[in-house]
Amino acid sequence: MPLPMALGAAGAWLTAAVLLLLSGVPPLSLLALVSATLLIEYGAAAVGIGLGVSPEFLLLFITTFACAIILSLFAIFDALAATSARVCGFLERAQVKHGQSRILRKYGILSLVPLVLIIGFYFSPPVAWFMGWDRRWSLILLAIGEVIGIVLTLAATLGVLQILG
């Protein structure tokens, strides 16, 4: 499984890079957008609006960027689990611990949608991975949660700007 996840991550990163190159956004603004996405995840949509980037591009770019990070994390976890006995032991303990969560047991993989809104796209993939949930569905549900966060951020940002304008 590590190779397909790594290839998927590489494809997502390549797509994000192509989007940046084709965007027509000035290089310093792109650097700010990438940095904001790394730091504040879907909150980077507000930064992008402030930089004059279109909401449509922001939705596409931040979602692609998030998918690249999610797939990269899955690939890293797979590689670590395949090569380290310590990591395997940690994973077993983590699966037991996360498996005791009432919310995760009740809603299962669907809990990823609100989870990505609450703890972000850096911490949600480990939960999906620890739980052993299907990677494709996990990616789809995490992306849906990310899109919801981006849309809400864009709506709030544009609404505030309209009020102030």
Image (cartoon, rainbow, N blue to C red):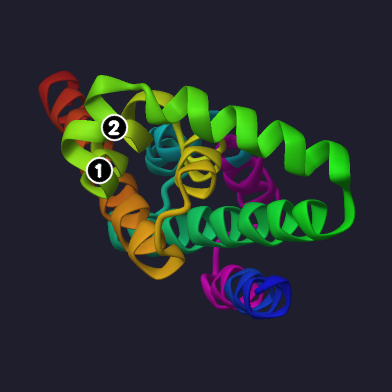
Mark 1 lies on a secondary structure that is: helix
Determine if residue 39 is in view: no
Quarter residue 43 falls in? top left
Vertical order, 115 against 10 (above or below): above
- The secondary structure that most of the magenta stretch takes on is helix
Answer few, some or many: residues within 10 Å of disc 1's Cα (few below 14, many 20 plus, some between 14 and 19).
some
> x, y (%) of residue 33?
57, 45
**Residue named by callout 2:** 104
Question: What's the magenta region?
Answer: 14-37
Answer few, some or many: residues within 10 Å of disc 2's Cα (few below 14, many 20 plus, some between 14 and 19).
some
> x, y (%) of residue 125?
51, 45
Label ID, residue 108? 1
Determine if residue 151 is in view: yes
Residue toward you, 81 or 73: 81
Vertical order, 90 against 59 (above or below): above
Mark 2 lies on a secondary structure that is: helix
Q: Amino acid at mark 2?
A: Leu
Task: Give yes or no for residue 122 being in the magenta stretch.
Answer: no
Question: Which residue is pictured at 25% across the width and 38% down the height?
Answer: 111
Question: Which residue is pictured at 20% across the width and 36% down the height?
Answer: 152
Image position of 11 (left or right of 98): right
Residue toward you, 17 or 99: 99
